[in-house]
Amino acid sequence: MSENPTKNKSSDNETKKLRIQIIAGFAILIPVILSLVLILFNARMGKTLKEHTANMIHDLNRQIMVNMDGSMAVMMANASMITSDETVASYDPVSGEADSDIEAEIAETLNKYALFPEYLDFCVVYSDGSHIGMISDDLVKACGDRLYPILEKALNKTGGWTSELVSGRTSMTYLARANDSAIVVASLPSYCLVRDISDSMFMEGMNAYVADRSLVIIASTDETVTPGSYLKTDISRLVDRVNSNPQIGKNYVVDAQKMNNEWFLVITVPTDELLNPIKSVTRYALIIALVAALIAFAYVMFMTEKIVGNVSQTVNRLDVKAQTDLLTGLINKRSFEEIVDMTLGNPDDHSSYALIFMDIDNFKSVNDRCGHDVGDLVLKSFSHTIDMVFRETDIKGRLGGDEFCVLMKMTEEDHGLLVEHVEEVCRRFIDRLHRKANSARQSLPAVTSSMGAAIWEGDSEGFEELYHKADTALYASKKRGKDTWTIYGQNELEKPKSGGEE
């Protein structure tokens, strides 16, 4: 029987058509499946990264807020010193005759308590418009002849803190009443609120804002934002004014902490910047998937590992940033306390530990004489000396300011040997500071250190108890004239052996 060419041709066409359909189906289906897997994985990793970042900026925000509240508390204390001064509180040139001698005494008192060099205003304003002390042209121009009524209205409205007296909110002001006709005014430039926290912003696009109760910006690390404007709508709607919990939105991850004066410290991270590493890898994966459809299933495993690796690296970098003191590279206070508590709660067999607490003698005078930039270099140099003297396995941290702490592991079983070990390390540390101070290459101010140590030999106490002992010992070193060490529980607390003399 002869073959039917038409039928064969039709059959060939159907086979060819079916082959094309199968190839086209897989060519479309495989990239689509891969794309869906990558999109879902990207969404999951993005959510995880956002949540991790939210927790990071929440911890960072709380640390910054504590420092900022402390600075503002100093400003309030300065003003309170003035209002509590008997001469200031009793003087009233409005109802009686002005007394130049009393006013000179008040001016001297103001000068004594004007501890911030950046003060724009630090004065006493009376109800007749007269004033004693330092007052800025901006405040005088803004208030004019109604200086006292405007200040009184602002004080009654806010209870003390205001940023509305000068146009553009270029200054933050604290007001306090001295008597029925006198108000103490203390103001600093608004930028002072965020001047020292820019280095804490550990991600591109990350910014910090200080805003009042109406979420009007007073100061910001964002150079594109003008003080006096409101927070962006997609940021302000994420500000949790009640519980101070971090919030995750479409465009921003936001954490807001309420400061003691009812203002808000807001930290934001744009989600675009946060997700850029994931997005770039995903786009690359999709392009490769379209070109290599036949090896897509093998390729998705490769890309999955690549994405996980990138996300893990990003998360690890965030972890390191959150655990590390940005200036010195040592462990920060919170992480140091957690690690020490964990170490003492699960000690190695037959191991003892020494907590050595140290600070830089007269560090404030270094900052005052040489400036904070040199002070930062001194802190870095001091932390480098810690790295050089102590072992890599020792836990080294900066607790804040010029205070440092080291947890040192020891294996000696005799208490006397433990004490000798600690004394030897303290001696080497102080000797190294002395050698550095006497080095011809040393360009920084010479510094010394006071040290206090407490030995842990399997007791039930944790970080707080051990830290208290080391702090007590450090205080004893200070009383002995500094530049020495003291070990808690030894005779050195009463009749110490000077480390500097050895």
Image (tube, rainbow, N blue to C red):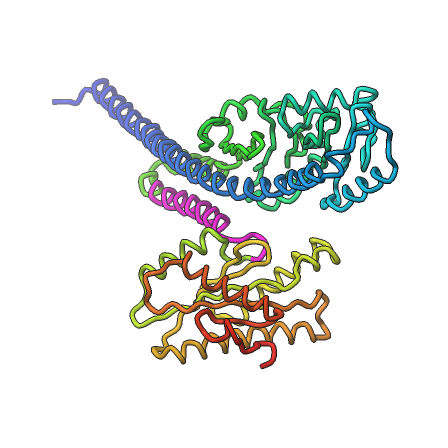
Front residue of 185 and 47: 185
Taking 203 as reference, is 162 above or below it? above
Specify whether residue 168 is in view. yes
Q: Is residue 453 left or right of residue 480?
A: left
- Image quadrant for the C terminus? bottom right
Residue at image position (66%, 67%) is 447
Q: Nearer the viewer, residue 170 or 22?
A: 170
In this rendering, is residue 133 above or below 465? above
Where's residue 395, x and y in %?
Answer: 45, 63
Residue 98 lies in what quarter of the image? top right
Q: Residue at x 49, y 26 (%)?
A: 241
For the point 80% across and 19% down, the residue is 146
Q: Quadrant of residue 358?
A: bottom right
> In x, y percent, where is residue 498?
57, 77
Q: What range of the chain is rendered magenta?
A: 300-328
Q: Is residue 304 magenta?
A: yes
Depicted 116 relative to depicted 400: above or below: above
Locate residue 234 relative to residue 90 in the image: left or right: left
Residue drawn at (44%, 39%) of the image: 55
Looking at the image, the residue that sits furthest to the left is: 1
Number of marks present in the image shown:
0
Residue nearer the viewer, 5 or 305 = 305
Quadrant that contains the N terminus: top left
The majority secondary structure of the magenta stretch comes to helix
